[in-house]
Image: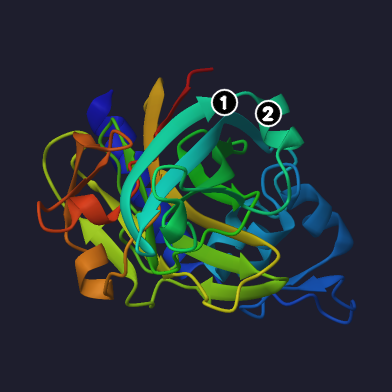
Amino acid sequence: MKKLGFLTSLMMIFTMCISPVYALGNETPYFTNMNGVELTKEQYNNLLKGFSHDTINTMSEEMIDFLKDDTNIQKVSTTKYVKVSTKYVNNEAVSTSEEEVSKAEFDNSPKESIITKSLITPMFAASDYVETDYKKITLDVTFGASISTKYVTLTNVWKQIPATKSFDVLAISVGVPSISFNFNGQRSGYQKWDGNTINYDASSGNWKIVDSSTIWKKGLGLSQNIVDATTTSLSNSITVVFLSGALPFPVRASYQHATSSVTLAQSHDYTLGTDGMGGLIKFSSSVWSKYDNTPGLYAELNI
């Protein structure tokens, strides 16, 4: 059965790679995404069953074509609400603590960052303080009529805008053998700030493919340089296609926010493993302290 499942997956990849692109003919497209993919209203609304508008807007043609006419789109989701408290001394982040909180606390938090000035050294209160922010992190596993093709989406939404804006990292790994995630066209990502969208397609140098023969040590990540001008809204997301007929289908995902300035190369200085930040991203010793150690997410598809 395992050999049959593997051959089936290979056939699906071959089909997805060589399938011709069909235009809408004389029909006026209802929606055209950032990659030029045209959709009818029916196709767009169909995709909304499994994806947000922003994800559809940045998905590749290959990712969209496989599901746009599928009327059996379903998804399973898990969400965490996280409170982030960062201590600054002389305006430099020195420590960060993370706490999972309720949806109610997240919803009731103010729109602006909570700044608690130093009571120990009041004369340095302007540069010594604790910043508290909240973020919502969601992991979705979406599939259609073919359970062997699974779309995994990790999305982070900030309730307040963090003070430090550098290279944040999103990563995904699955706990079963899988193929296709390292194929061009089978992954997408975006950063949405103040209503503007940065589209990270498969050719972006911000992706990192982590290959391994060991479960949970194989996957991929995307580094996103948070725009300095962001003031009102910020979200980050990646979507990856995995071809695997395995059930249950376990997934781990991690979003890590940089609390100090880092380069793209430093943000790529990690391996994957359950002993990493968020149960997945294992930064090198020289980079580890530069990230906030946000709790990770775990989901398991079993139908």
Callout 1 crowding tier (Cα within 10 Å): few <14, some 14–19, many ≥20: some
Measured from the top left, where is residue 4 in percent x and y? 29, 32
Q: Dot 2, how many residues are within 10 Å of its Cα: few (below 14), some (14-19), or many (20+)? A: few
Q: Residue at x 46, y 29 (%)?
A: 99
Q: Amino acid at mark 2?
A: Glu
Considering the image in quadrants, where does the N terminus appear?
A: top left
Q: Label 1 sits on what residue type?
A: Val
Does 121 appear above or below 174?
below
Could you tell me residue 27's position as x and y percent? 89, 76
**Which quarter of the image is occupied by the C terminus?**
top right
Look at mark 1 in the image and give the residue it sits on: 101
Task: Please state if 140 lies on the left or on the right of 71 as rendered.
Answer: left
Q: How far is mark 2 from mark 1, CA to CA?
A: 6 Å
- Residue 90 percent across, percent down from the top left: 35, 64
The answer to whether mark 2 and mark 1 are in CB contact below 8 A is yes
Does dot 1 land on a helix, a strand or a loop?
strand
Residue at the (81%, 71%) spot, across then down: 31
Q: Which residue is mark 2?
A: 105
Observer able to see residue 146: no
In this rendered view, identify the residue nearer to me: 198 or 130: 130
Depth order, front residue of 71/57: 57
Say whether residue 46 is left or right of residue 12: right
Whether residue 292 is visible to the viewer of this picture, yes or no, is: yes
Q: Residue at x 31, y 70 (%)?
A: 261
Give the image's coloring scheme.
Answer: rainbow
The kind of secondary structure element at disc 2 is helix
What is the x, y in percent for residue 191? 56, 66
